[in-house]
Amino acid sequence: MSVAVVGDSVGFTLAQDTPASIPGVTSVVDATLPGCGLLTEGERPPGAVAAGAPADYDGCAAAVAAADARALGAGPEVILLVLGAWERADHVRNGRTVGPGDAAWTEELRGVLAARVDALAAGGARVALWVDPCAPEEDGRRRQAWFRDEVVGPVVADRPAATTLDPSDVLCVEGRARTDVDDVGDPRPDDGQHFSAEGATWLWTTWLGPALAAVGAG
């Protein structure tokens, strides 16, 4: 099963450290783009800007289009779309703060996501949308649930070529992130989202490869 990975820096930490042999997967193309997720215009979250991120997403538009075109050009059978890290944060739009629970913001993100999924599926690939699980803190888990249930869920439900890919069973124990993987420890040690090289290799070989192969076979 040939795979392309697109999306943000969480996807990058998965795609850059693929092992030489992955059960069920013959090849992986890295078309990820750290710093860019679903949004391609408007201001970035104030906290991210204060930490050194660019002031807006405007530079992402052409870069995301080029990355997705590179993925499609490889002719993958399955495209893994990794999003959520940027989209879950509060943003400022038209002078007001929007985020999880804001109906207009939720609808806007659904529309942008639907267009992205449709474009990726146009070449005949199945699109697997990553579901980021078990954030370290309660607010993070609340934001993950909103993005999964209110943004990703309705988009996938309307598209036979799309599905969700939820690694909760292997990354979480009783809703909390695992930190005791054999020979790995914590697979996402820095912030509970981005994978270490050892964590990515472990996930590909034990769960992600077979899960993507099953998506392609379905």
Image: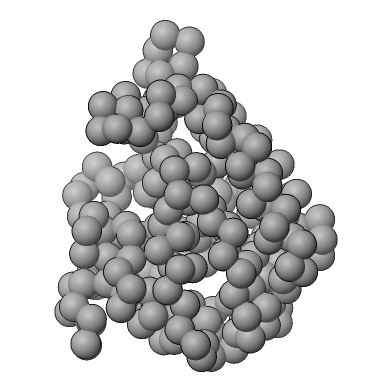
Asked if residue 29 shows in the view, the reply is yes
Q: Nearer the viewer, residue 147 or 127?
A: 127
Q: Could you say where residue 110 lies in the image, as x and y percent from the top left?
A: 60, 38
Is the residue 5 above or below the residue 54 in the image?
A: below
- The vertical placement of 105 against 175, above or below, is above
Q: Quadrant of residue 28?
A: bottom right
Residue 103 at least partly seen: no
**Residue closest to the eye, 201 or 84:** 201
Q: How many marks?
A: 0
Q: Position of residue 59 (x, y in %)?
A: 55, 31
What's the residue at 44%, 43% (across, down)?
A: 35
| Quarter of the picture holding the C terminus | bottom right
Instruction: Please say if 192 is above or below 26.
Output: above
* Image position of 169 (left or right of 208): left
Q: Nearer the viewer, residue 94 or 71?
A: 71
Q: Position of residue 5 (x, y in %)?
A: 57, 64
Residue 215 screen position, x and y as percent: 64, 75
Residue at (62, 80) in percent of width and height: 27
Q: Looking at the figure, which quarter contains the N terminus?
A: bottom right
Q: Is residue 46 left or right of residue 95?
A: left
In the figure, residue 47 lies in which quadrant? top left
Residue at image x 49%, y 68%? 15
Q: Residue furthest right?
A: 123
Q: Is residue 207 left or right of residue 125?
A: left
